[in-house]
Image (tube, helix red, strand yellow):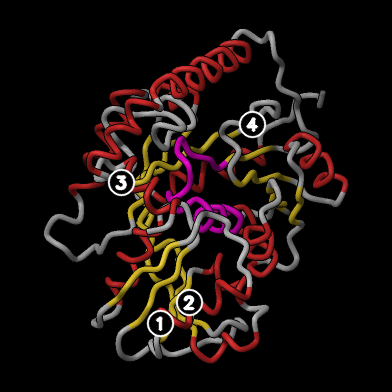
């Protein structure tokens, strides 16, 4: 098991005696992190630290935890929804190579701005002709004011207790949901199972405990087709497969692959935003041992540069299948680009 996989196992409480020891020893570090986050949040809440305004409306898509919520395909859906109402969106990302490559592949005509400063990125987007900025992973970046703050909570995210880094996956305490304008509960499970709605309702109840006044929409994500590594369409793989995922919650990719294939699936996990090298490719092919390798889109755009890898791999696309009260959510997005703007600061 890789260090990344072990950490995820530890956070789930399944790491045995070693995990229990890590939980105990990391408590002081969590306390320091929790305190620092609380102080920073208080400074913004009381306007001791000020948020700057962009010259164009800002929609932020973020989360409370470290990866695994399905945020990136939701950003894609939001960009499409904004385009349908005549807006010219730009996507602002902090600079991970896979996210940049994905957004640029998905919509070549949309500016994709790489900038750790979301405020500067939004200003750059406006100068490029964008009429609205969409922040990919922007909830904690409060230096930039936003017109719509959307937080994605996966059905697997509502943990008790909600431990913060490094003791758990939370970047902020759940009460931070109160400053969101909308919460999206993302679910990657199969919709046709008898318990399909139970996970969503548990997550909804958890969100309402912390932020009872914030509107909540369930959004179901799922497989949306197959591709070769060059982006061309492909048939589903036949026979057993090896699922390779370098994302925040690789086990969710295993679940998604298993939901669309009636074949044995094994998972090989790498850290989120992993930079693949030739040694990684050799290891993947060795473990695959002739099986088809199934990749996330984030991993495919990075592994596509290894020519010998193409014939043995397929990419499983992930997309938005259904949105609860979709018309209401689309109206909120349309309202962002229609309302008058304050003077930028």
**Label 3, label 2: how many angstroms apart (C-alpha)?**
30 Å
Q: Nearer the viewer, mark 3 or mark 2?
A: 2
Residue at which label 3 appears: 155
Query: Where is residue 151 drawn, in percent x and y?
Result: 47, 38
User: Reading the chain from its start, which is encountered first: label 3 or label 4?
Assistant: 4
Q: In which quarter of the image is residue 304?
A: bottom right
Label 1, label 4: how many angstroms apart (C-alpha)? 40 Å
- Foreground: disc 3 or disc 1: 1
Q: Tell me whether the residue at label 3 lies in contact with that at label 4, contact meaning CB atoms closer than 8 angstroms.
A: no
Question: Where residue 75 is drawn, which disc sits there?
Answer: none
In this picture, residue 4 sits left or right of residue 258: right
Q: How far apart are marks 2 and 1 (CA)?
A: 6 Å
> Looking at the picture, how far across and down is residue 106, in whole percent?
63, 68
Residue bearing the label numbered 2: 284
x and y percentages locating residue 5 in the rendered image = 39, 54
Q: Which of marks 3 and 1 is nearer the N terminus?
A: 3
Q: Do the residues labelled 2 and 1 touch (CB within 8 Å)?
A: yes
- Mark 3 and mark 2 in contact? Answer it, CB < 8 Å: no
Q: In this view, does 173 lie above or below 42?
A: below
The residue lying toward the viewer, choosing from 47 and 57, is: 47
- The residue that label 1 is drawn on is 288
């Amino acid at each position: 098991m890789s260090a990344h996989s072990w950490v995820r196992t530890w956070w789930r409480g399944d790491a045995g005696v070693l995990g229990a020891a890590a939980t105990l020893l990391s408590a002081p570090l969590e306390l320091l992190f929790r305190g620092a986050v609380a102080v920073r949040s208080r400074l913004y809440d009381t306007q001791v630290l000020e948020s700057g305004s962009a010259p164009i409306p800002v929609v932020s898509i973020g989360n409370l935890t470290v990866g695994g919520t399905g945020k990136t395909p939701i950003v894609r859906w939001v960009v499409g929804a904004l385009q349908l109402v005549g807006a010219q969106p730009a996507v602002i990302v902090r600079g991970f190579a896979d996210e940049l490559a994905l957004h640029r592949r998905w919509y070549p005509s949309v500016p994709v701005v790489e900038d750790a400063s979301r405020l500067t990125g939004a200003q750059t987007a406006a100068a490029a002709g964008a009429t609205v900025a969409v922040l990919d992973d922007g909830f904690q970046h409060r230096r930039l004011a936003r017109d719509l703050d959307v937080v994605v909570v996966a059905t697997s995210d509502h943990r008790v207790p909600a431990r913060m880094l490094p003791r758990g996956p939370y970047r902020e305490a759940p009460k931070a949901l109160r400053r969101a304008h909308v919460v999206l509960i993302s679910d990657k499970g199969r919709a046709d199972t008898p318990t399909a709605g139970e996970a969503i309702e548990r997550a909804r109840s958890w969100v309402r405990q912390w932020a009872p006044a914030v509107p909540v929409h369930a959004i179901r994500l799922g497989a949306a087709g197959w591709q070769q590594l060059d982006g061309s369409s492909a048939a589903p793989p036949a026979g057993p497969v090896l699922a390779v995922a370098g994302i925040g919650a690789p086990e969710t990719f295993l679940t998604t692959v298993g939901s669309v294939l009636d074949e044995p699936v094994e998972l090989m996990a790498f850290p989120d935003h992993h930079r693949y090298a030739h040694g990684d490719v050799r290891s993947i092919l060795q473990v695959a041992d002739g099986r088809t390798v199934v990749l996330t889109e984030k991993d495919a755009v990075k592994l596509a540069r290894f020519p010998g890898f193409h014939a043995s791999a397929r990419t499983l696309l992930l997309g938005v299948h259904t949105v609860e009260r979709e018309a209401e959510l689309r109206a909120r997005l349309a309202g962002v680009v229609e309302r008058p703007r304050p003077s930028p600061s």
